[in-house]
C-alpha cells in the first residue's frame, strides 16, 4: 500500500516564506534584511529550496538574480497562497483601530469620484494604520483571481471563485452639470433646450459599454450633439467651467463635481427614462470569512449606499 507523500517531500513550509522574499527582491542580502535573518541563513534556505524543487530558482543576472522559468511560474501562486496565510489570524477577529493592512480596491471612475474622499476620511478615523490602493477598472475579475486586488466595485462578475453582492440601484437618478453662467442656468431646463446644447460625454477607455443616455435617446428617435468625449472625470469640471458644454451624469457624481462654485447641477429633463446607476461589490471567495475583509467591505457597502441616495437637485 502506497503511503501519501508529505507536502513538498517534507520540506519545512516556513521556507516558503523565505522563497517568497527571495523571488520578490532577487537578492539573498535584501531577502535576509526583509526577513530579519542573517545572510548565511537565507543562503542555506535557498540551497535547501533548490534541492526540494530540483531547480536553481534564482540565477545570476548582472548585479542581481533572475527567476528561472519554474520560479516565475511558482511566484504568483506562492504569493496568493501566503497572502491568505498571512491573514489567517484575522479570521476569528479584527480590530480596525490597530490593524496594519493595505486594501487594494478596483473602482471605476464614475464611482471613484464620490467614493474615494469619504472612504479615505472614514479609514483615517476608524482604521488609521490601514492603507488604500485604488486600481483602475481594467480586468477586475483577473485582478481578484490573481489576488492582486481585494475588492472590486462595478459591474457584477460571474465567476465561480468570485462572490458578488449587488447594491440597490441609485435612487438619485441623473442630473445635468453645466457652468453657473450657462444660458441654461436660468429658466426651466426643458428637453428641447437640453437637446439644442453641445454635450460632453465621459466614456471610460476600453469599457465597450454603450452610453445609457445614448441608448435611451436612440430608442426615442432623438439626437444630441456630442462635441467632446473624455476618458475620465478628471478634466470635466475645468472643461465645463470654461465652455458652453453640458454633461449628463449620475446625480452623486454631478453633486460631487458641483462643489466647484463655477458649476451648477440641474434636474435631467430625460431623467425618468434613464437607467439608475447600479454597482456591485465583488471579492475572491477565499476572503468570505476573513474578519478584516468583512469589516472593510461592510464600510464600503454602507458608504456606497449613502452616496447612491444623494438627493437629486430641484427644478429652478
Image (spheres, grey):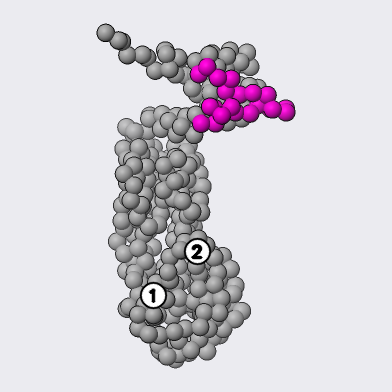
Residue located 51% across and 31% down the image: 73
Determine if residue 35 is in view.
no
Residue found at the far right of this picture: 62
Secondary structure at numbered mark 1 = helix
Residue found at the far left of this picture: 1
Q: Is residue 55 left or right of residue 224?
A: right
Q: Residue 204, labelled with which disc?
A: 2
Quadrant where the image shows the C terminus: bottom left
Query: What x and y, as percent, mark residue 211?
Result: 43, 71
Determine if residue 283 is in view.
yes
Q: Residue 90, labelled with which disc?
A: none
Q: Residue 215, labelled with which disc?
A: 1
Q: Is residue 65 magenta?
A: yes
Q: Is residue 286 left or right of residue 49?
A: left
Quadrant where the image shows the N terminus: top left
Query: What x and y, as percent, mark residue 11?
Result: 45, 14
Residue found at the far top of this picture: 1
User: Are there few (<14), some (14-19), or many (20+) residues within 10 Å of tag 1?
Assistant: few
Start and end of the magenta stretch? 53-73
Examine the rendered structure and indicate whether residue 217 appears above or below residue 153.
Answer: below
Residue located 43% across and 30% down the image: 81
Examine the rendered structure and indicate whether residue 144 appears above or below residue 109.
Answer: above
Q: Decide: marks 2, 1 in contact (CB < 8 A)?
A: no
Q: Nearer the viewer, residue 92 or 74?
A: 74
Examine the rendered structure and indicate whether residue 198 appears above or below residue 215.
Answer: below
Query: What x and y, as percent, mark residue 50?
Result: 55, 17
Which of the 4 image quadrants contains residue 154? Answer: bottom left
Q: Nearer the viewer, residue 19 or 175?
A: 19
Amino acid at each position: 500500500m502506497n503511503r501519501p507523500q508529505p507536502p513538498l517531500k517534507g520540506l519545512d513550509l516556513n521556507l516558503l516564506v523565505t522563497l517568497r522574499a527571495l523571488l520578490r527582491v532577487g537578492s539573498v542580502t535584501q531577502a535576509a534584511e526583509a526577513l530579519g535573518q542573517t545572510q548565511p541563513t537565507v543562503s542555506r534556505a535557498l540551497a535547501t529550496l533548490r534541492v526540494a524543487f530540483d531547480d536553481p530558482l534564482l540565477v545570476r543576472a548582472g548585479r542581481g538574480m533572475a527567476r528561472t522559468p519554474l520560479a516565475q511560474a511558482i511566484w504568483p501562486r506562492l504569493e496568493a497562497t501566503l497572502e491568505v496565510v498571512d491573514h489567517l489570524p484575522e479570521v476569528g477577529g479584527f480590530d480596525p483601530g490597530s490593524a496594519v493592512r493595505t486594501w487594494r480596491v478596483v473602482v471605476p471612475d464614475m464611482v471613484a469620484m464620490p467614493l474615494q474622499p469619504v472612504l479615505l476620511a472614514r479609514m483615517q478615523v476608524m482604521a488609521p494604520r490601514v492603507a488604500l490602493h485604488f486600481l483602475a477598472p481594467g480586468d477586475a475579475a483577473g485582478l481578484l483571481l490573481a489576488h492582486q486586488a481585494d475588492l472590486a466595485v462595478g459591474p457584477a462578475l460571474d465567476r465561480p471563485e468570485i462572490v458578488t453582492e449587488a447594491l440597490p440601484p441609485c435612487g438619485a437618478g441623473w442630473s445635468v452639470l453645466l457652468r453657473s453662467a450657462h444660458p441654461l442656468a436660468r429658466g426651466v431646463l426643458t428637453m428641447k433646450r437640453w437637446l439644442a446644447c453641445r454635450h460632453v460625454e465621459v466614456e471610460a477607455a476600453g469599457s465597450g459599454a454603450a452610453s445609457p443616455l445614448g441608448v435611451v435617446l436612440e430608442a426615442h428617435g432623438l439626437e444630441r450633439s456630442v462635441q467632446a468625449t473624455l476618458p475620465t472625470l478628471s478634466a470635466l469640471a475645468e472643461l465645463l467651467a470654461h465652455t458652453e458644454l453640458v454633461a449628463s451624469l449620475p446625480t452623486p457624481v454631478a453633486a460631487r463635481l458641483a462643489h466647484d462654485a463655477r458649476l451648477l447641477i440641474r434636474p435631467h429633463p430625460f431623467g425618468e427614462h434613464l437607467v439608475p446607476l447600479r454597482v456591485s461589490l465583488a471579492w475572491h471567495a477565499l476572503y468570505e470569512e476573513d474578519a478584516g475583509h468583512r469589516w472593510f467591505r461592510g464600510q464600503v457597502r454602507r458608504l456606497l449606499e449613502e452616496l447612491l441616495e444623494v438627493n437629486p437637485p430641484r427644478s429652478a
